[in-house]
Amino acid sequence: MLSRNLTPGKGSNITQRRKFSLEFKARVVLEMLTEQKSAAQISREYAIKNSVLSRWKQEFIERSLQLGEQGTASDDRDQRIAELERIVGRLAMEPERWFYRRRRGTVIIY
């Protein structure tokens, strides 16, 4: 029975997978989107396959759409909070008539 060396190193056929930061991916995708460089040029320059670049581009576009959706939800929430703060402020400034009501000389507390 033959045993194989499964740890990467000298004489092994296993290569370690490269990991790229989100910042690097975004910079590369922006280079493609702003047409500073073509996908083929970027592929050669950074030694990254075209399929990987295409996937990064698709993920970038999807995430940017999600950020846009979160922004509108955040705006709605902020508007609602501002409205509720105005209501609370108005109620705090109202006279105490909410708590007391006079009826024929007697005070009724609610």
Image: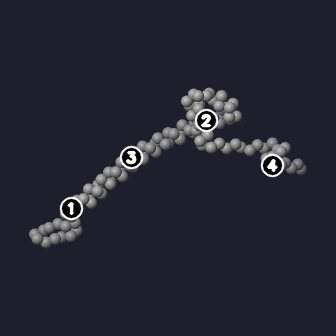
Q: Quadrant of residue 36?
A: top right
Q: Which mark is first along the chain, 1 or 3?
A: 3
Q: Could you tell me which residue is drawn at 46 percent across and 42 percent down?
A: 69
Report the residue marked by disc 4. 6
Percent x, y of residue 11 = 84, 44
Q: Which mark is first along the chain, 4 or 2?
A: 4
Element type where label 1 sits in the image: loop
Tell me the amino acid under the disc marked 4.
Answer: Leu
Percent x, y of residue 93 = 24, 59
Q: Is residue 7 left or right of residue 59?
A: right
The label shown at residue 28 is 2
Report the residue marked by disc 3. 76
Q: Are marks 2 and 4 in contact (CB under 8 Å)?
A: no
Tell me the amino acid under the disc marked 3.
Answer: Asp
Q: Could you tell me which residue is drawn at 74 percent across and 44 percent down?
A: 16
The label shown at residue 87 is none
Q: Is residue 93 left or right of residue 45?
A: left
Element type where label 3 sits in the image: helix
Label 3, label 2: how many angstroms apart (C-alpha)? 33 Å
